[in-house]
Amino acid sequence: MLVIFDCDGVLVDSEPLANVSFSRALKAVGLDWPVEETMRRLMGRSLKSCLEICEAELGRKLPDDFLEKMQAVTYQSFRDAPLQPVAGVREAIVALQEAGLDTCVASSGSPEKMRFTLGLTGLWDLFEGRIYSASQVPRGKPFPDLFLHAAIDMDVQPFDCVVVEDSVPGIQAARSAGMRALAYAGEPYADPPALNQAGGEVFDAMQRLPGLVLA
């Protein structure tokens, strides 16, 4: 069996920090979305998809340096906080690996961002060489492309995969790929009913993850 982890909000507690940066950056270019709105509209999607949604809302292209400036601010906020792993996730990963299960990461984030966030939180060593990004496939979540790409590369059938996600697009992508979807809803911003409606099995603590996967 293969356990596929999303990164942001599942492995690293980055969503609140990242969405504050995104909200501020959008406000500076004329799109006044509070943090709650950026989370509702953009969480779990690839950066390319997020920018397209924002440009459609604005009715114009974002400035050429928008992404570069925003990412610089976001990365600095990760350093300053500093960014932490999601509570209990390292222990859950180790327990699954010790039980003989394969693990990997499949995220909407870029390879560079994952190297930075997983490195900063001390999780990189648990997944090195098994990290997949939406930038490697034609379509990001909610399409199944990324999870199927990870399964093919890891040589595991989709029906033998379990995906751990925290966003509705991620759960939709997992279900579209024919995979079991476990929906982590342990953070204050989580929307358990929406995750459940998308087809996720909702749980609220990473300590429960090994038992759920192995059940």
Image: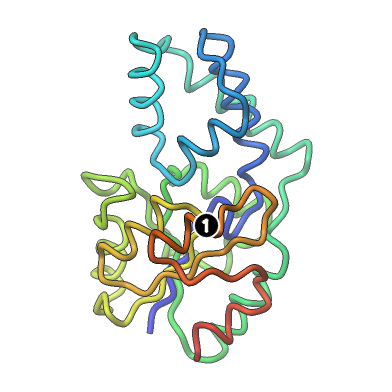
Which of the 4 image quadrants contains residue 59?
top left
Near mark 1 (Cα within 10 A), the count class, few <14, some 14-19 or many ≥20, is: many
Q: Height in image: 162 above or below 73?
A: below
**Foreground pick, 62 / 40:** 40
Residue at the right extreme?
81
Tell me: 91 left or right of 179: right
Tell me: 171 left or right of 97: left
Instruction: Count the labels in the image.
Output: 1
Residue at image location 52% in from the left, 8% down from the top = 30
Residue at image location 31% in from the left, 46% down from the top = 140
Question: Disc 1 designates what residue?
Answer: 166
Q: What percent of the width, then of the height, locates residue 90? A: 66, 70
In the structure shown, which secondary structural element does the residue marked by tag 1 occupy?
loop
Q: Height in image: 213 above or below 192?
A: below
How did the renderer colour the structure?
rainbow
**Foreground pick, 1 / 39:** 39
Residue at image location 24% in from the left, 79% down from the top = 157
Q: What percent of the width, then of the height, locates residue 113? A: 52, 42
Residue at image location 25% in from the left, 48% down from the top = 137
Q: Height in image: 60 above or below 106?
A: above
Q: What percent of the width, then of the height, locates residue 154? A: 31, 73
Question: The residue under label 1 is which amino acid type?
Answer: Asp
Name the image quarter holding the N terminus. bottom left
**Foreground pick, 15 / 183:** 183
Q: Height in image: 195 above or below 206?
A: above
